[in-house]
Image (cartoon, grey):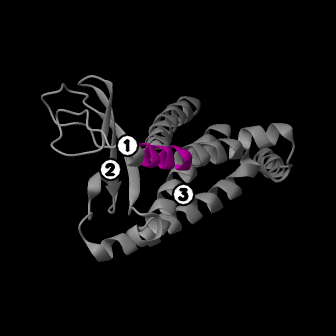
Amino acid sequence: MKDEVTKAKGTSEKETKFRWNGKTFFFSFLWLAVLLLVIDLASKWGVVNYFHTHPIHENPHLSSAFSKEVIPDFFYLTLSFNKGSSFGFGDNVVWARYVFIVISWVASGALAWYWWKNLPKNDRWMNAVLALAFSGALGNAIDRTFYWDNIVGFSGVVDFFQFYLFGADKDSFAIFNVADSALVVAVAILIVLTIVRAIKDAAKKD
């Protein structure tokens, strides 16, 4: 019993000894979240401005779109504005966008809060997951909230990565952006991390 109390006390002390310095800043992955957010916003505006000055259409699989061929029949930069959520859900429902705006900011705030509370644990992998998820959620929240036709000339979340993963004769994968990619990678890492840690915990108990 004494050993358990000592161990718990030691763990508690370890978690409360968090101090900002070069090492803790790096492994907090705050820099990664800021970098990804800047890349996300800059890439969206870059693609929008490019297609507004170069209204081209190089994707033979689409009847009408701003699209530039990068790898024939596989990868295109295709400008798309999503006013809904993932995969365009709710795109044509006006009130749904306001719901998604609220959800986006609540999710961003919750991730930031949990990330901040998690820092004293020095859990580097979880910090990376939260950094990726936060940057992705915030990037799309900014689009949904501030990008309207009467303000910037376009409306909704800016998407532009388009892949034909299963061949040119099949439908393309969902058009997405850097923020979406960060969210997907965060979920993938979290799933693997959860499984690996569960296996390790089970092995320790045996």
Q: Secondary structure at mark 1?
A: strand
Q: Which residue is mark 2?
A: 80
Image quadrant holding the C terminus, namely: top right
Judging depth in this view, the residue of 189 and 79 nearest the camera is 79
Q: Residue at x 79, y 52 (%)?
A: 12
Give percent across and percent down for residue 172.
22, 36
Q: Circles 3 and 1: CB distance less than 8 Å?
A: no
Disc 1: CA contacts within 10 A as few (<14), some (14-19) or many (>=20):
many
Identify the residue at horizontal 82%, vertical 53% (top origin): 16
- Mark 2: secondary structure: strand
Q: Is the residue 150 above or below the residue 45 in the image? A: below
Q: Which callout, 3 or 1, points to the residue nearer the camera? A: 1
Asked if marks 1 and 2 touch (Cβ < 8 Å), the reply is yes
Between 174 and 61, the one nearer to me in the picture = 61
Q: Main secondary structure of the magenta part?
A: helix
Tell me where the magenta segment starts and ends, as one range.
41-50
Of labels 2 and 3, earlier in sequence is 2
Q: Is residue 166 above or below residue 146?
A: above
Q: Is residue 47 magenta?
A: yes
Q: Is residue 118 left or right of residue 191?
A: right
Residue 137, image x, y percentages: 50, 55
**Label 3 sits on what residue type?**
Leu
Mark 3 vs 1, N-terminal side: 3
Decide if residue 156 is in sight here: yes
